[in-house]
């Protein structure tokens, strides 16, 4: 697998994490940033939170399995695209 394939896969995982995080942020929170318990106990919130944890875990696992040189190359690609 070449570095561009890795970059595209990583970006797809990051997009999924961002999407699920945005969905969690729609539930609203108190002034201190915590989600109220009555919202946390709903099935919709639990489903969305589980999806977020799964997506975030997949991204962590992907990043953990990259070699140091691959991480450096991915970082350089991202800098060039900015």
Image (tube, rainbow, N blue to C red):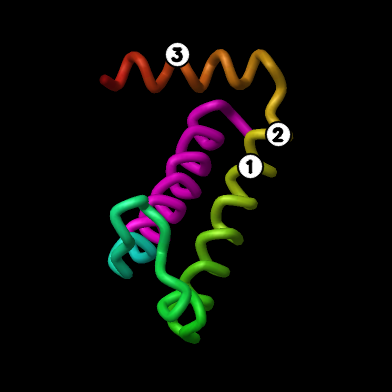
Residue 17 horizontal/vertical position (percent): 45, 52
Frontmost residue, 30 versus 77: 30
Residue 77 horizontal/vertical position (percent): 42, 19
The residue to which callout 2 is attached is 64
Name the quadrant of the N terminus.
Answer: top right
Residue 11 lies in the magenta stretch:
yes
The residue to which callout 1 is attached is 60
Magenta segment's dominant SS is helix
Say which element carries label 3: helix
Task: State the extent of the magenta-drawn residues as a range.
Answer: 1-22
Q: CA distance from mark 2 to mark 3?
A: 18 Å
Q: Residue at x 36, y 51 (%)?
A: 32
The residue to which callout 3 is attached is 76
Q: Is residue 14 left or right of residue 56?
A: left
Frontmost residue, 40 versus 67: 40
Q: Residues within 10 Å of mark 1 (few under 14, many from 20)?
A: few
Q: CA distance from mark 2 to mark 1?
A: 6 Å
Residue 61 horizontal/vertical position (percent): 69, 43
Q: Residue at x 55, y 57 (%)?
A: 55
Q: Is residue 65 above or below residue 35?
A: above
| Corner quadrant of residue 76 | top left
Q: CA distance from mark 3 to mark 1?
A: 19 Å
Say which element carries label 1: helix
Q: Earlier in the sequence, mark 2 or mark 3?
A: 2
């Amino acid at each position: 697998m070449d570095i561009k394939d890795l970059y595209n896969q990583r970006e797809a995982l990051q997009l999924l994490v961002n999407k699920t995080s945005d969905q969690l942020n729609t539930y609203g929170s108190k002034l201190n940033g915590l989600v109220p318990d009555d919202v946390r106990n709903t099935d919709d919130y639990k489903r969305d939170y589980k999806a977020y944890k799964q997506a975030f875990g997949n991204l962590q696992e992907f990043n953990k399995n990259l070699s140091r040189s691959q991480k450096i190359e991915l970082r350089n690609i991202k800098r060039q695209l900015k």
